[in-house]
Image (tube, helix red, strand yellow):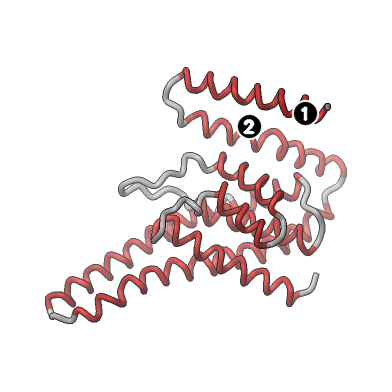
C-alpha cells in the first residue's frame, strides 16, 4: 500500500464527495447524491464499478427512509454512504478484493455518520440564514456586489465540509479495515459475512417496505423479489 497513491485516491474521493454533497441539498439536486448513484460513481473512478454497484444498492435500501422535504432534516445518507464506499473501495484497490465481511464492517463503521451529518446540516442551515441576513442588509445599503459572493460562500462550505469528512472517514476506515479484518478468525468471519449476506439486505428491504402505504404494494414487492431471486438462481445454475 503506497501512501502517495492512497493520498491521490483520497483527494479524488474528497472531490467526488464534495460534489455529491452539493447535489444532496445545496445545488443541482439531480439525485447523484443517492447511494445507488454516488457509490457506483466512486467505484467507477477507483476502477471498481462492480463493488460500487453492490455496495451502493445495499446502502440505498438502508437509507430509503432518509428523505428531504420541507423543513425535515434526515440523517445525511450521502455522507455515511460515501465514507462506507470510500473505505471499502480503497481496501479493494490497495489491499485485497473486498469480501462480504469487509463490506459489512465498512457499513457498520459508516452508519453513525448519518446522524452526525444531520447535525452538520442543521448548523449549515443556521449559517446560511446568517448569510441571508447579510444579503438583506446589503440590499438595504445598496451594496449589491456583496450579494454575488454570498451563494458561493454557502456552496463552498457544503463542498468543503463534505469533502473533508468523506476523505477523513475513508482514510480512517481503511486503516481500521486493514487492522481488523486479518484478526477475524473463522467463526467470527463467517458470522460477519452471514450478517452481511442476509441480515443487512433484509434490514434494507424492511426499511423499503415500511415506506409502502398500501398492502397491495408490499405484496407486489415481495412477489417481484421472489421472482427475481428464482430467475437469478436458475441463471446461476444454467
SS of the residue at dot 1? helix
Residue denoted by label 1: 235
Q: In the rendered view, would you say 108 is above or below 147?
A: above
Residue at mark 2 to residue at mark 1: CA–CA distance: 22 Å
Quadrant assignment, res 206? top right
Residue 22 image position (x, y, % from top left): 44, 62
- In the rendered structure, the answer to whether residue 98 lies left or right of residue 137 reads right
Residue 150 image position (x, y, % from top left): 30, 74
- In the rendered structure, the answer to whether residue 162 lies left or right of residue 91 reads left
If the image is split into quadrants, where does the N terminus sit? bottom right
Residue denoted by label 2: 202
Question: Mark 1 and mark 2 in contact (Cβ < 8 Å)?
Answer: no
Q: Nearer the viewer, residue 114 or 85?
A: 85
Q: Residue at x 38, y 50 (%)?
A: 73
- Bin the neighbour count of mark 2 within 10 Å (Cα to Cα): few under 14, some 14-19, many 20 and up: some
First in sequence: mark 2 vs mark 1: 2
Quadrant assignment, res 87? bottom right
Q: In the rendered view, would you say 148 is above or below 233?
A: below
Q: Nearer the viewer, residue 171 or 10?
A: 10
SS of the residue at dot 2? helix
Residue 179 image position (x, y, % from top left): 78, 60
Residue 212 image position (x, y, % from top left): 46, 27
Amino acid at each position: 500500500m503506497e501512501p502517495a497513491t492512497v493520498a491521490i485516491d483520497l483527494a479524488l474521493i474528497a472531490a467526488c464527495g464534495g460534489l455529491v454533497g452539493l447535489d444532496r441539498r445545496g445545488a443541482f439536486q439531480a439525485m447523484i447524491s443517492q447511494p445507488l448513484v454516488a457509490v457506483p460513481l466512486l467505484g467507477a473512478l477507483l476502477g471498481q464499478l462492480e463493488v460500487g454497484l453492490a455496495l451502493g444498492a445495499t446502502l440505498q435500501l438502508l437509507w430509503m427512509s432518509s428523505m428531504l422535504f420541507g423543513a425535515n432534516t434526515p440523517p445525511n445518507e450521502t455522507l455515511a454512504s460515501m465514507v462506507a464506499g470510500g473505505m471499502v473501495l480503497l481496501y479493494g484497490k490497495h489491499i485485497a478484493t473486498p469480501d462480504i465481511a469487509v463490506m459489512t464492517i465498512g457499513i457498520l463503521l459508516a452508519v453513525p455518520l448519518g446522524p452526525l451529518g444531520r447535525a452538520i446540516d442543521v448548523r449549515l442551515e443556521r449559517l446560511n440564514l446568517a448569510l441571508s441576513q447579510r444579503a438583506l442588509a446589503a440590499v438595504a445599503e445598496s451594496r449589491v456586489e456583496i450579494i454575488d459572493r454570498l451563494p458561493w460562500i454557502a456552496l463552498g462550505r457544503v463542498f468543503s465540509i463534505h469533502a473533508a469528512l468523506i476523505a477523513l472517514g475513508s482514510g480512517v476506515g481503511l486503516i481500521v479495515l486493514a487492522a481488523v479484518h486479518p484478526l477475524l478468525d473463522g467463526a467470527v468471519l463467517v458470522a460477519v459475512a452471514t450478517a452481511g449476506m442476509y441480515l443487512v439486505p433484509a434490514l434494507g428491504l424492511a426499511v423499503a417496505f415500511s415506506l409502502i402505504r398500501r398492502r397491495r404494494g408490499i405484496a407486489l414487492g415481495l412477489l417481484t423479489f421472489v421472482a427475481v431471486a428464482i430467475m437469478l438462481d436458475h441463471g446461476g445454475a444454467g
